[in-house]
Amino acid sequence: MSNTIKPAPATGAVQTAAAAGATVYQEQIVTRASARKVLAVARMVIGFTFLWAFVDKLFGLGFATPAERAWVNGGTPAQGFINGIEGPFAGFFGMFANPFGDVLFMAGLLGIGVALMLGAGLKIAAVTGTLLMGFMYLAEIPFVLGGNNPVVDSHWHEALLLIIAAVTLSGDTWGVGKIWARIVGNSWLR
């Protein structure tokens, strides 16, 4: 391992390569190996957060979801949360308080978690995960309902981790991102 610090490529060079159809890899965006590893760990941590939420709600492992409220036991993972919303958007979110809302919520948790853990499909995971976090933020809007901070809560942090994972192509390190990039290039599937 070399301690030589390479200068970061000009942003224009990466954009030119992408515009010319050349696949862009993480090393072209994040030049320090240690930074790429930190980004990979952050990607896997947020991925595990989503995957764990899916597994806990599916089987009711007794952490956030007791066994009797597990989806496999007839529980309603999204409806339970939605029916407890008291803020100004309760009416809007009420339209998702049904079995379709449960399927959509669980599919989202699974898809986002798997994409982040594998390091493929990060752009889609970032968009859908940020949308989910935005909805959950509005459902628990802290400046109306109260909280530790009147503006920022953990939903912002999670959304930012999703976006950072996608824009830095963190799936290329300790993930299948490079293999996936050879198949889909720089498309939205990346």
Image (cartoon, helix red, strand yellow):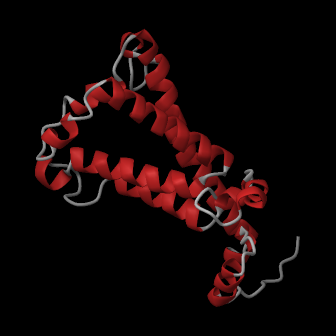
Q: How many marks?
A: 0
Note whether 149 is above or below 140 in the view shown: below
- Residue at 42% over, 12% down: 67
Q: Please tell me which residue lies in front, 91 or 88.
A: 91
Residue 43 locus on image (x, y percent): 59, 53
- Residue at 60% over, 40% down: 114
Note whether 56 is above or below 74 in the view shown: below
Quadrant location of the N terminus in the rendered image? bottom right
**Res 18 seen here:** yes
- Residue at 56% over, 45% down: 47
Quadrant location of the C terminus in the rendered image? bottom right
Residue 187 location, quadrant: bottom right
**Res 154 seen here:** no
Q: Left or right of 182: which side holds 60?
A: left
Q: Please tell me which residue lies in front, 109 or 68.
A: 109
Q: Left or right of 171: which side holds 46?
A: left
Residue 62 locus on image (x, y percent): 43, 18
- Residue at 45% over, 61% down: 160
Residue 112 locus on image (x, y percent): 53, 44
Q: Please tell me which residue lies in front, 29 or 190.
A: 190
Residue 111 location, quadrant: top right
Note whether 184 is above or below 77 in the view shown: below
Note whether 151 is above or below 101 in the view shown: below
